[in-house]
Image (cartoon, rainbow, N blue to C red):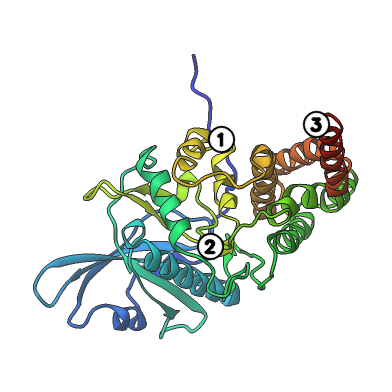
Amino acid sequence: MAESTPEVIWDKETDVPERWIQFVDENVVAALPQGTKVQGISPHGASYWTRTAEIQTEQADGSAVSFFVKVTQNDFGKGMASGEFVSMTALYNAVPDLTPVPIAWGSYASNANVHFFLCSFVDMTDDIPDLQLFPAKVAELHKKAISPNGKYGFPVPTYQGQIPQEVAWKDSWEEFFRCSLKRILTIEEASQGHNAEMSQLIESLMDKVLPRLLRPLETGGRQIQPRLVHGDMWDGNTSTDITTNLPKIFDATCIYAHNEVELAPWRPIRHKIGKPYIQAYHRYFPISPPEEDHDDRLTLYCLRFNAVSSALYPGNLRFRYLVVEDMRKLVEKFPDGYEGWEKSLANISNDECLHS
């Protein structure tokens, strides 16, 4: 049987010229440990939006140590570098063995329009992290890293690919997610064009589905806390340290959010990290009540994840089809919204009183 050809999601060259990783800029050198001697730089890894490289060095004690640098350009690239540094620093401070060590971000001395993110170099496998170790470490992150002000958001802009995501602080998860989803769907429409059915579905999604699935998390005596999430934890942004055999995460785009939003990339069947990881995660971090809404909440969160993917790749409608499919499913299932759910609970309570 002939092998199938992998689908090409994006076939365009990154806008960042390769020349920016053919030397080590003096501002990058200045961020390295004192006494570092640069021995060389070579491309390492792959990215649609940046250039990435390994910097080989000799340290003051004579040891050979490598560092990882990611290079971007223009104003959005500056935001990407800043956002990744703050994100990775927050993750590292919470669970130091889960990430490379963030070192610095800044702009090139040789060209102020070129920006960089610098961290330790970790030699990683090509495999996804262990089914038990990885969910346990992610749960540890979510337990330890709680919003410093009790709100949902993040202190600096963070980017999903080239898209700045919503970070403005909000008091409730429903309010924050509504703003976040609305922002992404607006960008997706600008990228892929208007679709009449999708516009109608979005109206019902916002008016009925979103409050039905998110408001119960913070009403009726239930509560959640805004917790630090990596923000894009699919298998392409995770791996295993060859030396320690521990999971590693990178390319973070953090927000303080409902922790279950982290699981959205684990839901699509196209990803190697899938539902078994969700099940393993909840052995370490319980499902938020109402537990019966869990699967539909993840569908809603995954819808946002796929909408970001659609916005990133204009002309490729694969992800839009997935978004519309999930919208149809949720709108059909929850036509009465939060108010209808409240009435059904009241009816159940009345029936129980009558039969008691």
Q: Is residue 342 visible?
A: yes
The residue beneath circle 2 is: 253
Q: Is residue 198 visible?
A: no
As drawn, 45 above or below 115: above
Q: Relative to 3, is 22 on the left or the right?
A: left
x 49%, y 70%: residue:
72
The residue under label 3 is which amino acid type? Ser
The residue beneath circle 3 is: 356
Q: 10 Å neighbourhood of mark 1: few (<14), some, or many (≥20)?
A: few
Q: 10 Å neighbourhood of mark 3: few (<14), some, or many (≥20)?
A: few
The residue under label 1 is which amino acid type? Arg
Seen from this angle, which residue lies furthest front?
356
Q: Nearer the viewer, residue 180 or 176?
A: 176
The tag earlier along the polypeptide, 3 or 1, is: 1
The tag earlier along the polypeptide, 1 or 2, is: 2
The residue under label 2 is which amino acid type? Thr
Seen from this angle, which residue lies furthest left?
62
- Quarter of the picture holding the C terminus: top right
How far from the left and from the top, in percent, is residue 13? 54, 56
Q: Nearer the viewer, residue 4 or 261?
A: 261
Q: Which mark is residue 270?
A: 1
Q: Nearer the viewer, mark 3 or mark 1?
A: 3
Q: CA distance from mark 3 to mark 2?
A: 52 Å
